[in-house]
Image (spheres, rainbow, N blue to C red):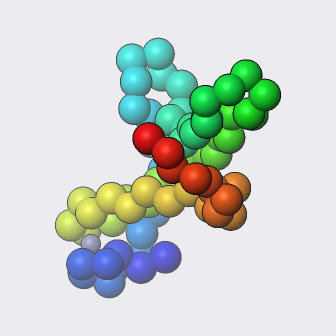
Amino acid sequence: MQCFKCETEMKKVKFIGNAAGMPSYLTYKEKGVFNPEIRDNVECYVCPKCGYIELKAENPSLFKNLTNLS
Ligand SMILES: [Zn+2]
């Protein structure tokens, strides 16, 4: 993957977004006990030249049927 800003080849790294040190993930759950929680890992790429960071869902198709009521 190339940097969106300076076209340098980006490096894949881990993105930790909380104090517990666990990798961050995307989550979505509709109201109702029978609706399963959807979780997906976050892929993170950093540009070693300009510092631009790109976050991507690992399996974006998991979210294609969301109703987004909230
Ligand atoms: Zn860059």
* Above or below 4: residue 58: above
Q: Which residue appears farthest toward the top when viewing the image?
A: 20
Using the image as rendered, state which of residue 61 and residue 69 is in the foreground. 69
One can see residue 55 in this view: yes
Total labels: the figure holds 0
* Above or below 45: residue 42: above
**Image region (quadrant) for ligand 1:** bottom left
Q: Which of the 4 quarters of the picture holds residue 36?
A: top right
52 left or right of 59 in image: left
Q: Which of the 4 quarters of the picture holds residue 15?
A: top left
* Rendered residue at 25%/68% (across/down): 49
Using the image as rendered, state which of residue 61 and residue 11 is in the foreground. 61
Q: Which residue appears farthest toward the right when viewing the image?
A: 34
20 left or right of 52 in image: right
* Above or below 6: residue 33: above
* Rendered residue at 69%/34% (across/down): 37
60 left or right of 13 in image: right
* Rendered residue at 68%/40% (across/down): 38
Figure quadrant of the C terminus: top left
Question: Residue 61, how many percent across, how many down?
Answer: 68, 63
Q: Which of the 4 quarters of the picture holds residue 60?
A: bottom right
Question: Residue 21, how many percent across, how many down?
Answer: 48, 22
Question: Residue 43, how many percent across, how many down?
Answer: 54, 54
Q: Which residue appears farthest toward the bottom when viewing the image?
A: 7
